[in-house]
Amino acid sequence: MAAIRVASPDALYQLATTGWRAFSSDPVMRWFFPDDDDYNANGQVVFRRVLRRGLALNTVWTTDDAVAFARWTPPGRPEPEVDDEPRTDPAWRVSRFLAFRANSEANTPPEPHWYLNMIATHPDWQRRGLGAELMTQVFDIAGAAGLGCYLETESEENVAYYRRHGFEVRTEWDLATDDEHDRSQGPHQWGMWRSPR
């Protein structure tokens, strides 16, 4: 079994690289970055932004070598203030980020819960049980407090994976923007809930 610990801020860039590699074919990430060159040049910024907030909350669990991580948000979904690097996203990508956020908020369960914002394993280390070990850290915390866990995912393969870990589909929706300049249809998403145990 891998050694699991709460990640420290100095692991930010290594963790972002892990996420960037793990999500290189993820349907939502590629909706944000459909062009390979764009993803390769700019995709890691998204992971650094997500991870900075989790690191500020001390809710990123990782392996000692940072080849896998789970970024959780505690109940109430606090938003810490962090210093983010400047971004120059085109307007169409901003509209997709906003559409993703709006759909996520619309499908957020009303019950207090831990939110699995992102889980990633570097492709060279996948299928070794690291994701399960990482999730267990918060399953135990949530269960002890009588709280459920929630996540969103965008592939049937992932739905089956998370079902094996106690999640069940609660909601489904299709991502799309209402921007008149970008009517792109995004991927289908599933909101999944794991009851406390």
Image (tube, rainbow, N blue to C red):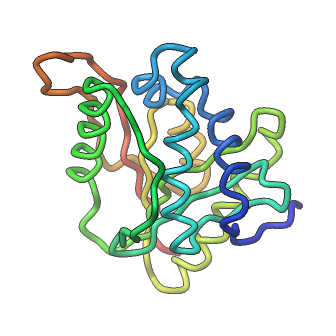
Residue at x 60%, y 42% (from the top left corner): 161
Residue at x 33%, y 74% (from the top left corner): 76
Answer with left or right where residue 135 lies relative to residue 65.
left
Q: Position of residue 99 (x, y in %)?
A: 24, 36
Report whether residue 195 is seen: no
- For residue 177, above or below residue 197: above
Instruction: Compare residues 179 and 133 and report the one nearer the observer.
Output: 179
Q: Position of residue 110 (x, y in %)?
A: 24, 67
Instruction: Examine the image and state in which quarter residue 17 appears.
Output: top right
- For residue 65, above or below residue 20: below
Residue at x 41%, y 50% (from the top left corner): 192
Which residue, as the protein is rendered here, is positioned at the far bottom?
A: 145
On the rendered image, what quadrant is the N terminus found in? bottom right
Q: Position of residue 44 (x, y in %)?
A: 58, 38
Instruction: Examine the image and state in which quarter residue 126 appears.
Output: top right
Answer with left or right where residue 180 lies relative to residue 127.
left
Residue at x 47%, y 30% (from the top left corner): 29
Instruction: Compare residues 85 and 54 and report the one nearer the observer.
Output: 85
Q: Position of residue 183 (x, y in %)?
A: 19, 16
Answer with left or right where residue 127 lies relative to residue 193.
right
- For residue 90, above or below residue 50: above
